[in-house]
Image (spheres, coloured by chain):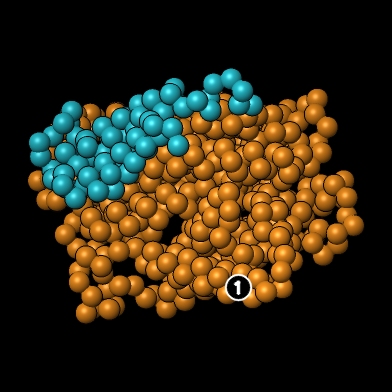
Amino acid sequence: MHGTRWLAIVPFLALVVGPFFVNRVTPFILGLPFLLAWLVAWILLTSVIMAVIYATDPVNREGEP
Amino acid sequence: MNGALPFIAAAALLALTLGFLASRGKDMSLEQWTVGGRGFGAIFVFLLLAGEIYTTFTFLGGSGFAYGKGAPAYYILAYGTLAYVISYFMLPPIWRYAKENRLYSQSDFFVRKYDSPALGVLVALVDIVALVPYLVLQFKGLGIIVEIAGYGAISSTVAIWIGAAVVATYVMVSGVHGSAWTAVVKDTMILVIVIFLGLYLPIHYYGGLAEMFTAIEKAKPGFTILPEHGESLWWYASTVLLTALGFFMWPHSFGSIYTAKNAKVIRKNAILLPLYQLILLFVFFVGFAATLQVPGLTGPNIDLALFKLSVKTFDPWFVGVIGATGVLTALVPGSMIMMTAATLIANNLYRTVNPSADDRQVSLLAKLLVPVVALVAVFFTLNGGQTIVALLLMGYSFVTQLFPSLVLSLARRNIATREGAAAGIIAGVATVAAVSLTGTNFHTLSWLPPEIQDLNIGIVALAVNFIVLIVVSLATRRAAAPAGVAAE
């Protein structure tokens, strides 16, 4: 298993375990209640994490069909 | 005749036309019809996988969920995102195996991996029982949308018949190519409409997002966070995990993996799909905006929130545009479900009974079965009462039961035997059925701590499934061992 692949655990921690610590209405962030803002931020970061995994994963270089 | 109808009619016509054109220049063999000749690039695979997110369930149900229950709706954002993270690792090996073995359906995958046509029949049956209520839900949504957005000019019954006829026709002609082409239009429209509604409605009625959420918090304190009991944090976490695992077990989503040209297409989509999931945020905004503007919808009627608010806010012609988008969210997933169900019956039930059937016969039978599947779904839509709703709730839990034996089969050395896989699936499905039909949940067991009471009961079915799978696999492996190498 390639090194950066382990980053895939982070979205699970942030989106499943995270809400236990951030289940609150305030402060509002960009107009969103805090819990919703937390989830939205981590969905954006999940996309970034998947991009990092994709870019560093050797299976996506040539050789792979 | 009113301003809305021409738009809705145009959407149906456009779907039909595109659906027909999609087959041009292709010889519609089973390989082309059901898995697009395994030649789809990133955009089509993206749209087929995304088609799962934007069904009538999310369009009506997502906004309705936020309207009626508030924060618990957030789970939909989270589970889809996590399902795409899983997809990066789980789908490429499935795709490769399917290509090497020329598989057409999810059931085929189990037949090959476990070398057992009987297991394939079991999986096909579970799939079909889960798919039909899903199709019924699309038709029901279609009927509601046309009736409300058309201001009652067309009854929902007429709309359902027309919708079913349109989809069945283009699926017979073009198969998955038709679904992919119509998905292009559907997703473009839903993107524009949903983002517009999600931004416009909060500003129009409240002056902005922060103002809207402040007003909601004042009227209903705690509505935008998870509650202490019931749909609590424990409910959220268990439901997100369970549904993320079940996401790709839907046979039509599973089948859309097969259409990919290569594995990179699938991995690349795992980057983009979480962003696409965020469109649901705007669907939630619509539901939240409706909470204080069109109050009073309860029970299943919460699903009407989006259209009730739209009718209150906009001119008929624009309600028609929203209605047209809604119609497409029913037709595109509907087309994939019909095709998948027909392929399963022809390829995995009929071919098992009659192994001498060749690809031509199976392909012809699958196409002929499309209108039959459509008729069955229309029948249940128009006549089914509560039973169909109960079946639908079970559907997701049913297909999730395929997860353990599927994931284990991807390992280099599969610890599950075919008997173990079958016993696990049967035990899991039986648990789901027993729990759903008797209305059992952890809340009826008052001696449990409240955290456990709130857990999604589906966890139990999956645990039962897994334990039975392991025990039976160990037993059958040991029984086979003294007989020597026969098992290998």
> Percent position (x, y) of residue B473?
57, 69
**Label 1 residue SS:** helix
Q: Compared to B176, does B142 lie above or below?
A: below
> Percent position (x, y) of residue B304?
38, 49
| Residue nearest the viewer, comparing B330 with B145 | B330
Residue at image position (19%, 50%) is A20
Residue at image position (79%, 62%) is B352
Looking at the image, residue B242 sits to the left or right of residue B259; the answer is left
Q: How many marks?
A: 1
Residue of label 1: B478
> Percent position (x, y) of residue B140?
52, 54
Q: Quadrant of the C terminus of chain B?
A: bottom right
Q: Quadrant of the N terminus of chain B?
A: top right
| Residue nearest the viewer, comparing B478 with B42 | B478
| Chain identifier of the orange chain | B
Chain under callout 1: B
| Residue nearest the viewer, comparing B394 with A50 | A50
